[in-house]
Amino acid sequence: MAKYTAASPESLEHLPGASTAEKRSLARWYAAARAALAHNRPLTTVFAMPAGRHLAGELCAAELTALRGVGAFKNDVPVNADSDPLLRSQAQYMALLEESLSAAEAAKLLGVDVTRVRQRLRERSLYGLEYEGTWRLPRLQFERRLVIPGLAQVLKALPPDLFPLDVVDWLLLAEPELQLESDAAPLSPRTWLLSGRPIDAVVKVARDLTRS
């Protein structure tokens, strides 16, 4: 999948039949999700950016096409994202695709051949979303040009059919079981793994999701 860019921007103002509020609501959710992902913040804690805040957030032609492709529009009119959780999740999903790496980009980051990345995706030692015949790899699984420690064991313990937005939030949200006496608050699975703590603790939490 080609990465969406704003090389040929098409303002939402040109979308017929949509109110200004509807256009800006959708753009805010999309932009807010991208900002959260860029800073490894969970999507469930994201709120749409205030209307007065500047957005790179006029969506370009490719982004509009992608959102239409997942049903984000009804009769070419965006549903009000502030009151439609389905549309919010669709906008977040497209933001996740946009903020993720292609297999080639991930290979360059890790200093390996792209065939190795594809092999690891098949083995579930890397996490990817298959979209239109190509792979997108969320950035949160990488840190300083490395895969976060223990990711392969954790991914293999997670339910294979877990929705991508749920995978992202699970890795980034604080988990009550991941807290030591010295910790002021529970840690997220990602933070726990990056701190070099026992991988088995996160694997156990992942397996519990399968049983629930």
Image (spheres, rainbow, N blue to C red):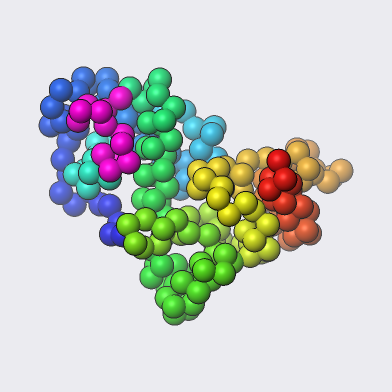
Can the viewer see residue 53 in this picture?
Answer: no
The question of residue 76 being in magenta is answered with: yes
Q: Is residue 206 left or right of residue 102?
A: right
Can the viewer see residue 182 in this picture?
Answer: yes
Q: Residue at x 42, y 47 (%)?
A: 96
* Depth order, front residue of 9/131: 131
* 27 relative to 20, above or below: below
In the displayed orientation, state which residue is furthest to the right. 181
Q: Is residue 138 left or right of residue 13?
A: right
In the picture, residue 3 is in which quadrant? bottom left
* 23 relative to 162, above or below: above
Q: Residue at x 15, y 22 (%)?
A: 17
Residue 16: percent from the left, percent from the top? 13, 27
* 15 relative to 20, above or below: below
Q: Is residue 79 left or right of residue 33?
A: left
Q: Is residue 167 left or right of residue 15?
A: right
Q: Residue at x 19, y 30 (%)?
A: 76
The question of residue 129 being in magenta is answered with: no
Residue 206: percent from the left, percent from the top? 69, 50
Question: Image quadrant for the N terminus?
Answer: bottom left
Q: Residue at x 37, y 37 (%)?
A: 91
Magenta stretch, residue numbers = 67-79
